[in-house]
Image (tube, grey):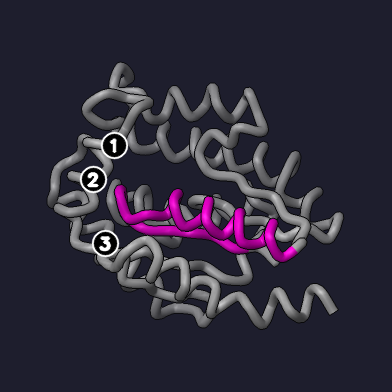
Amino acid sequence: MFITFEGIEGSSKTTQASLLDEWLSSKGVDHLLTKEPGTVLSKECQQIRHLILSPDYDIGPRTELFLYLADRAQHVDKYIKPALKDGKWVISDRYADSTKVYQGIGRGLGVDTVTSLIDYASGKLMPDITFIMDLPAAVGVTRARSSNTEFAGGDRMERETLDFHSQLRKGFLALSKTHERYIVLNASKSIEELHEEVVKVLSKHVNDTLR
């Protein structure tokens, strides 16, 4: 089972992925918790993350896209695919859908163009379930900038305009209507309420795994 959490900045993706990690551990489900860009499992991916997100760098849209794809190719080949092959669940805080929305829509590179490159970088590996965490852009960006301990004042993405982030929100919501694997959650709810909704969706799958 491959599960991803997607959404705009500050939408509780990381928190909910971590809570799911704890819940799966309590149920005895063998799994891997990871993220994009810059999974802690890979020093190469962490270096790419710094290039992408540090406000110190002036990176063009196409360069940004190819850095994300490089991160994903390494992530998928070295960690995600091997974990799935071993029968583990994989939880990822961001994955391909972020690239479709951020670079395809936000940067104006085109969803179709970006999707074909994502397919190549990922070997067409797509999640089984994707939770899209939705909330107003202004709320999410304020949360993200104030809580970022890696880059004071926010990373390169978090420092983009509110219009940019509002466009991303619309992009995620539009994407959610294209496939049944997407589940939209109201990220304005409490952390506990959101976790309960995630668990409700996944409980049957966990029971099937443990039989």
Q: Secondary structure at mark 2?
A: helix
Q: Is residue 110 above or below residue 53?
A: below
Amino acid type, label 2? Arg
The alpha-carbon separation of the residues under discs 2 and 3 comes to 15 Å
Q: Are marks 2 and 3 in contact (CB under 8 Å)?
A: no
Image location of residue 32, percent across then percent down: 69, 50
The alpha-carbon separation of the residues under discs 1 and 3 comes to 20 Å
Q: Are marks 1 and 2 in contact (CB under 8 Å)?
A: yes
Quick one: label 1 or label 3, which is nearer the N terminus? 1
Quadrant of the image for the C terminus? bottom right
Image location of residue 183, percent across then percent down: 45, 75
Crowd around label 3: few <14 · some 14–19 · many ≥20 (10 Å): many
**Residue designated by label 3:** 169
Q: Is residue 94 visible?
A: yes
Quick one: label 2 or label 3, which is nearer the N terminus? 2
**Residue designated by label 1:** 147
**Residue designated by label 2:** 143
Amino acid type, label 3? Arg
The alpha-carbon separation of the residues under discs 1 and 2 comes to 6 Å
Q: Secondary structure at mark 3?
A: helix
Q: Quadrant of residue 177?
A: bottom left
Check if residue 9 falls in the magenta segment. Answer: yes
> In the image, which residues are magenta?
3-27
Q: Quick check: 120 left or right of 86?
A: left
The residue drawn where x is 31% and y is 71% is: 186
